[in-house]
Amino acid sequence: MKAFKFYISSLKNELIKLRRTLAFWLTIISGLLFPILFFIAYSIKPLILDKGVNPWEKFMTLQIENSIPFFIPMFIVLIASLIMQIEHKSLGIKHLFSLPIPKWSVYFGKLSIVILAIISTYVYYFLAILISAEVLGLINPDLTFLEFRPDFLKYIKLLTSTFIACLGIVGIQFWLSFRFKNFIISLGMGMFLAIVGIIVSQAEQSIYFPYSFSVLSVSLGDKMPMIFGISAVAVYSLGCFIVTILLGYLDIRRMNIE
C-alpha cells in the first residue's frame, strides 16, 4: 500500500509539472494536425463516392494509413525527450533523487506520464477525425457522411494495434531521454532511428526493428506473421518495451545523478 502511495504521489506531481509546458500542448496539436489537414483537403477537393458507399471507410482508412505509421514514432521521440528535458533543464532529477522516496516511483511515474501523453494524442486524433467528418457532412451533403456511421470498433482496434506496435519505441526513447541530460542527443538518436525504421520497413528483417513496427502494424494487414495467434509485431514490441524499461530502471537505479 505504501509503494502504491509513492507511485500515485509521483504521478500527481508529474501531471502538475506537465501543465502549460510544450509537451502538454504538443499532445493536443499533434492529435489535431492530420485531421485538420484532411479536412482542408476534403473541403478543397471532395472525394464523392458512388451512391450507397459508406464514405467513412475511405476517409478514416486514408488518414490512419498515411499518418499514424510515420507520425507516431516521431511524436514518441519528441514527447519523451521534452518531458525529460523539463527535469534535466532545471536539475529536477537531482532534486527528486535526493528526496526520501524510492527511485522506482520517480522512474515509473514519468514513464506513465509519457504513455498517458501518447494515449491522449490518440484520443484527440480519433475524436478529431469523427468531428471533422461530421462537419464536412454538414458543409457538403454530397459527401454523405451524415447518412452513414463509421465502424467504431474496427478503427479503435486498428489504432490500438498501432499503439501497441509503438511501445518498443517508447521503452527505448524513455531510457535514452532519462539517461542523457543533453536534449539533442536523445532527440537526434531517436529521429535518426525513426527515419531508418521508415526506410527499412519494406525489408523482411524489419520485423525485428522496433522503429519499423508502426509502419508494419498497418502495411502488413492480413500478411502479418502470428505468434501463438498474436501479431508478431505486437509480441516483439511488448517484449522490447518490457526489456528496455527494466534495463533502463536498473541503469537509473545505480546511476549517480550529479
Image: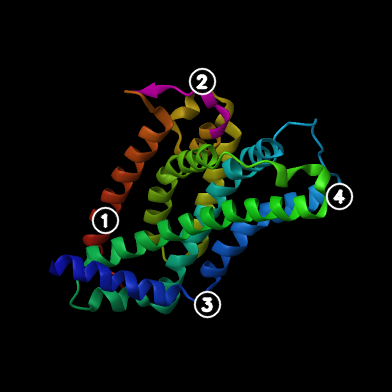
Inspect the magenta stretch and tell me whether residue 143 lies in it: no
Q: Circle 3 is placed at which residue position?
A: 20
Q: Residue furthest left?
A: 1
Query: Looking at the image, can residue 84 be seen?
Result: yes
Whole-percent x, y for residue 227 in the image: 35, 24
| Amino acid under disc 3 | Arg
Kindly identify which residue carries mark 1. Answer: 249
Please name whichever residue, 220 or 141, is drawn nearer the observer in this view of the structure.
141
**Is 221 contained in the magenta span?**
yes
Q: How many residues crowd around disc 4 within 10 Å: few (fewer than 14), some, or many (20 or more)? A: few
Q: Is residue 177 left or right of residue 190?
A: left
Q: State the CA–CA distance, disc 4 to disc 1.
A: 50 Å
What is the spatial separation of the Cα atoms under label 2 and label 1, in whole angstroms? 35 Å
Q: Which x, y percent locates residue 225?
A: 43, 22
Element carrying mark 3: loop
* Residue 252 image offset from top left, x and y in percent: 27, 60
Report the Cα–Cα distance between label 4 and label 2.
Answer: 35 Å
Q: Please state the extent of the stretch shown in magenta in the rendering.
A: 218-227
